[in-house]
């Protein structure tokens, strides 16, 4: 089994909206680009260490019970992280991890953005989204 590492740009979506509407200078929008983010289909959400959550200035949404390798635990979910990778963009909630923990890109943002992992080649495949075919379905 292989692992897939990728580069992800994350931005505070609330800052983006404030800047777009002229309430915040564009250079004040909090954003970070992280290399070697583990794309992990065993994780559900985007998961970021506490120092990245603080750097982005994300808003607390709620506390939830999660299942970890060490057993159940109460953790915090923050909202409005704008992700950009492989030409795809979207806004997602994120789970806060303890400081110093590597970030994880979980299956939910991967699927929503139309990204698929190939563990044999350790690469991300960008699924089609155009006039000749699309990964998006409406049934």
Image (tube, grey):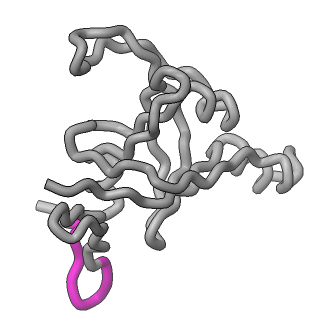
Q: Quadrant of residue 131?
A: bottom left
91 sits to left or right of 11: left
67 in relation to 23, above or below: above
131 is within the stretch colored magenta: yes
Identify the residue shown where x is 43% and y is 28%.
95
Quarter of the rendering containing residue 72: top left
Query: Residue 7 or 107: which is nearer the viewer?
Result: 7
In x, y percent, where is residue 37?
44, 50
**Relative vertical location of residue 130 with respect to residue 103 in this rendering, above or below:** below
Decide which of 28, 106 is in the foreground and name it: 106
Dividing the image into 4 quarters, which one contains the N terminus? bottom left
Q: Is residue 3 above or below residue 53?
A: below
Quadrant of image for the C terminus: bottom left
Residue at coordinates 31% horizontally, 9% vertically from top-left?
73
Asked if the magenta segment contains residue 55, the reply would be no
Q: How many marks?
A: 0
Residue range (magenta): 129-136
Q: Residue at x 30, y 12 (%)?
A: 65
Q: Residue at x 52, y 56 (%)?
A: 35
| 9 lies above or below 42 | below
Q: Quadrant of residue 43?
A: top left
Q: Name the residue furthest front.
A: 1
**Residue 59: percent from the left, percent from the top?**
61, 26
Residue 90 drawn at (x, y percent): 47, 55
């Amino acid at each position: 089994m292989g692992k897939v590492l990728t580069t992800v740009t994350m931005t505070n979506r609330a800052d983006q909206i404030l800047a777009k509407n002229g309430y915040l200078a564009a250079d004040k929008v909090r954003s970070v680009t992280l290399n070697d983010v583990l794309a992990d289909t065993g994780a559900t959400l985007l998961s970021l260490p506490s120092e990245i959550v603080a750097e982005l200035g994300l808003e607390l949404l709620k506390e939830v019970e999660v299942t970890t390798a060490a057993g159940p635990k109460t953790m915090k979910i923050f909202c409005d992280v704008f992700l950009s990778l492989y030409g795809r963009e979207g806004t997602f909630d994120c789970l806060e991890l303890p400081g110093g923990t590597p970030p994880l890109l979980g299956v939910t943002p991967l699927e929503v953005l139309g990204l698929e992992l190939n563990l044999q080649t350790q690469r991300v495949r960008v699924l089609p989204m155009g006039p000749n075919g699309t990964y998006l379905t409406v049934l």
